[in-house]
Amino acid sequence: MRNERVGVAVGAFVVGGALLFAVGLFLIGDRRLLFAERYEIETTFRNVGGLRVGTKVRVAGMDAGEIVGIGIPRAPSEPFVVRLRVRSDLQRLVRADSVAGIETDGLVGAAFVQVAPGSDQAPVAPPGSRIRGVDPVGFADVMAQATEALRVFQDVAKDVSGHVGHTLAELTETTAAVNGVVSSVDTAVDELSAAGKDAVTEFRGVLAETRGAIASVRRGEGTLGKLVADDALYEDVRAFASRTAETVESLRGTTEATRTGVERLLAPAGPIDQVLRELRDSAEAAGEVLADLAENTEALKRNWLFRGFFRRRGFFDLDAMTPQQYRRFADDTSRRQVLRLWVEAAVLFARDERGVERLTEEGQRRLDLAMGTFLEYRRDSPLVVEGYATEGPASQQLLASDTRARLVRDYIVRRFRRDASLTGSIGLGADAATSPPGTGRWDGIALALHVER
């Protein structure tokens, strides 16, 4: 009887194991799309970094198959030929103008091939056909473009400085020339006026003295008669007036040309406006590149591959930690030592007429004395302001302690010019295991400096 039970148990175990194996095989085959109808197409890449046989293939973001082969090119100028196995039910989305690209899950995730759907006018890509592949842009390429953008920005700034200086020099020379011409014209006019006055005076004198010789003058006899009859003096005066008019007209043309040049230079679509627009576009491009770099660095801080490195350097996100997680993190003294200075709330805070706690002048002096004890340590050591409050229920304690920590943290950053990324705050309620009274509770704040061992 006992042998029969053992046989039944062994048989049940074998049958159960076979069923589990069959279910697992079915699940794995369904995940790898082994039971779906598929067909193969090809694409080309010059850089297959992160790709291998078995890498996922997605069509419009949906899992569609995998890579079944990567053909090595015969020459450096030829691309790699990648064979893709895709589900047949997605074939109507893959058209002759579809484009394949290499993408990654997140910033440093696994690579996969993304096939974009084609247009409705293009024919469906038949089995064995080849679609166009687009090589990915790496992080090194982005940094190279940022460096090139900054270099172009510097070159444009130098060119603008040279052009503006040259233009101002030419404008100064033109103004000096115009002033010279105006001064010459003024001098000539003054001389002409003086000569005219002298001639009139002299003529009146001669007329007064030669009244008796009028008859001789009319007949053209004597010196005065010859003078009246001679047209040379009239022609000289007329020629001088003509030259004066030409000079004034030339001056007017020079002034008009100068005004036109200055208006063209300062026009909305002129050279200076174009240079300023290029400078603004270059600055915006550089700002976008630096913003992208900051976002990528922030993403690296939260990636599991680099999280340990940033934590060892003192980069940890208090906003992403609960009070319990922070306590476990602070109690881990394998890599760093936590130095705490405790200050009571009665010394630091006072309530205003609305009942809101404010940092007092006495509290500020106490914080200055407390921060003075940390001057012997490195300024890049992370400093966390821990807030504690014992009044009210647990939720009210957490809220009040967080408010106190933020008040002290803002004062320390502003007063001691500490790096805001290395100075944080967190509310911990009333629980303080290492508080000076030894009661496990505290009402106030603690300055916790995380120092590397």
Image: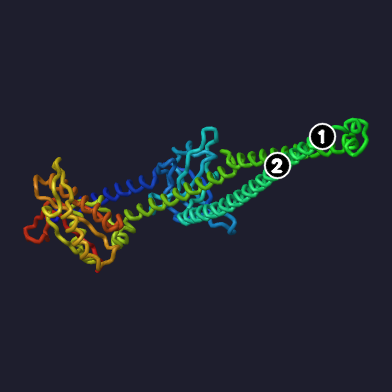
| Mark 2 lies on residue | 190
Mark 1 is on which residue type? Leu
Q: Which residue is mark 1?
A: 207
Identify the colour scheme used: rainbow
The reply, left or right, for residue 348 in relation to residue 236 is: left
Q: Is residue 310 left or right of residue 338?
A: right
Q: Residues within 10 Å of mark 2 (few under 14, many from 20)?
A: few
Residue 159 can be seen, yes or no: yes
> Quadrant of residue 437 in the image?
bottom left
What is the total number of numbered labels drawn onto the structure image?
2
Q: Nearer the viewer, residue 260 or 11?
A: 260
The x, y position of residue 45, in whole percent, is 52, 52
Q: Dot 1, crowdedness within 10 Å: few (<14), some or many (≥20)?
A: some
Secondary structure category for the residue under label 2: helix
**Visible residue check, residue 246:** no
Instruction: Report the residue at 67% width, 47% height from top.
Output: 180
For the residue pair 173 and 25, the one nearer the viewer reads as 173
Q: Residue 344 in the image: state x and y as whole percent.
A: 12, 56
Whether residue 422 is situated above or below residue 66 in the rendered picture: below
Cα separation, mark 1 vs mark 2, equals: 26 Å
Q: Which mark is first along the chain, 2 or 1?
A: 2
Secondary structure of the residue carrying numbered label 1: helix
